Image (cartoon, rainbow, N blue to C red):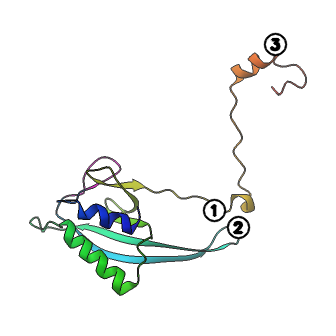
């Protein structure tokens, strides 16, 4: 989700709730302790220099059970961050939240909850670093249908 999208969504909400990938909710007394721009300048395993930028929200829960972050307050925090930090509202949002460890999540909205979505690592230079291209899987039963003698020379069974 882009920063511009969350601002529009927040303007139409009365409350904010974040749902973790396992379906549980972040306790409703959470704080957004940081809104920032994170720049990652790196070289991938194929030798290509890359730059990535995201907007980072850090969610934190404290013993302040009376605290509730209202949508209009989060919009004001976002707008202040955009102005002071020069954040482009077309950047994607990444959310940090601490369960057993600090997790980084993508962000989506299902009409009721902001969904913290699992992120995965990936090789960005598969063609340069020697990662084999995945071969298509063929069921052995399918080979028999193609040829009445599935193990004949040139049939591809061996």
Q: Confirm whether the magenta stretch covers residue 39.
A: no
Percent position of residue 152, x then y? 88, 19
Q: Earlier in the sequence, mark 3 or mark 1?
A: 1
Q: Which residue is mark 1?
A: 124
Between 91 and 4, the one lying in front of the other is 4
Q: Residue at x 33, y 80 (%)?
A: 81
Q: Position of 145 compared to 50: left or right?
A: right
Percent position of residue 47, x then y? 70, 72
Q: Which residue is mark 3?
A: 148
Compared to residue 112, the image places residue 29 above or below, namely below
Q: CA distance from mark 1 to mark 2?
A: 8 Å
Image quadrant of residue 99?
bottom left
Q: Residue at x 16, y 63 (%)?
A: 29
Percent position of residue 149, x then y? 83, 14
Q: Secondary structure at mark 3?
A: loop
- Which of the image's four quarters has the C terminus? top right
Q: Earlier in the sequence, mark 1 or mark 2?
A: 2
Q: Which residue is mark 2?
A: 46
Q: Are marks 1 and 2 in contact (CB under 8 Å)?
A: yes
């Amino acid at each position: 989700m882009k920063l511009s999208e969350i601002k529009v969504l927040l303007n139409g909400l009365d409350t904010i709730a974040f749902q973790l990938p396992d379906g549980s909710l972040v306790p409703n007394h959470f704080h957004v302790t940081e809104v920032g721009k994170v720049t990652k300048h790196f070289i991938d395993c194929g030798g290509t220099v890359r730059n990535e930028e995201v907007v980072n929200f850090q969610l934190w829960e404290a013993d302040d059970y009376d605290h509730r972050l209202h949508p209009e307050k989060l919009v004001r925090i976002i707008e202040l961050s955009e102005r002071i930090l020069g954040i482009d509202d077309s950047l994607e949002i990444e959310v940090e939240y601490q369960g057993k460890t600090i997790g980084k999540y993508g962000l989506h909205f299902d009409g009721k909850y902001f969904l913290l979505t699992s992120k995965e690592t990936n090789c960005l230079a598969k063609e340069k670093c020697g990662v084999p291209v995945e071969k298509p899987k063929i069921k052995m039963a399918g080979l028999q249908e193609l040829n009445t003698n599935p193990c004949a020379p040139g049939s591809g069974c061996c």
